Amino acid sequence: MKKYIMDCDPGHDDAIALILAARHLDLLGITTVGGNQTIEKVTTNALKVLEVIGRTDIPVHPGSQHPWIQKLETAPQFHGASGMDGPQVPVPTTQPRSTHAAQFIVDTANRAGRISLIATGPLTNLATALQLDPMLADKVEEIFIMGGSVTFGNWTPAAEFNIYVDPEAAYKVFNAGIPMRMCGLNLTRQAFVADKDLEILKGINNRVALFCHDLLRFFIDSCRKTAYIPGANLHDVCAVAWAVDPALIKAVDMHVQIELQGKYTRGMTVCDYRHLRNELPRQDMVHEATARFRGEQPNCAVGVELAVESFFSLLYDTIKSY
Ligand code: BDR
Ligand code: CA
């Protein structure tokens, strides 16, 4: 069985992603990163989730408080002052571990020989781990990330939050030569939940379902108020779902680069799929019939289509199983 570390910044969708990961994957540890909220808050939130699902055996290692070169930008307008507002969960009885997240990733890869990573926050810890151990890339089988977009962004017109918060770290990770599986907004917008999903969770009516209900009640309301959308997207859950069941996501290989300079586009994932131009709809082929692909080789499998019904069956069956 493959061994995983999940790097996250809970976060409502991170919390649900953790619930899925802890049930289906051999999770050697959770690392936390400053993102949706400060490192202290997201670490407490990760411990709370593990307590709710009865998995306090999984160690939590806090990592980077802020991005490589810029100030941390958090997302209280979506996730509240605590980073996981909504459910009333007591202060966790367990403590985070003292080894820094990046060091934990390096040590675990050396001990296990080979690991896979899932990242649902800014990529600061992963980039720092690659910096600490230049041989780490050879020991990482694949990285599933929630981040970026083939189409438009959410934090800016061009950039998605996780990449926008630490573009230099994202650049390091995307260019490390590790097989990448990217769940960008173009995919995660298909994992859409609204009031009807709250009813399903109420119907399941166990401790974990009611916790998820309270998470989504808050998240749906804040997305409504802040982004004017009639529900919420389970962004981070897609990255875990891909690791659990690859058949859930149709992906296309692309060369993805991180924009570091652009005045309007910093943090954008520039996705090059010109090599597929002959497979695109007719209007895109105009003047292209004889053109040759002059781009870089693909470095990333980019999720484009989610098997929505099966995704939600997996999620609700998992919640029921707790
Ligand atoms: C990403 O940003 C965070 O607010 C969510 O947890 C998710 O990881 C979506 O852009
Ligand atoms: Ca997240």
Image (tube, rainbow, N blue to C red):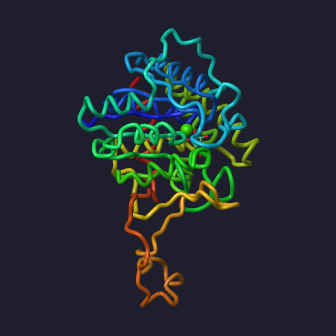
At which x and y percent is residue 172? 46, 50
Most foreground residue, 64 or 43: 64
Tell me the residue at 45%/70% (across/down).
273
Seen at 59% across and 57% down, the residue is 260
Q: Is residue 241 left or right of residue 88?
A: left
Extreme residue toward the top, this view: 93
Pick the residue in front: 311 or 32: 32
Up/down of 277 relative to 72, above or below: below
Of 262 and 10, the residue lying toward us = 262
Residue pictured at 34% horizontal, 27% vertical? 28
Above-or-below relation of 35 to 138: above
- Horizontally, residue 8 falls left or right of residue 266, namely left
State which quarter of the image contains the N terminus.
top left
Q: Nearer the viewer, residue 103 or 290?
A: 103
Quarter holding residue 153: bottom right
Q: Position of residue 242 (x, y in %)?
A: 39, 46
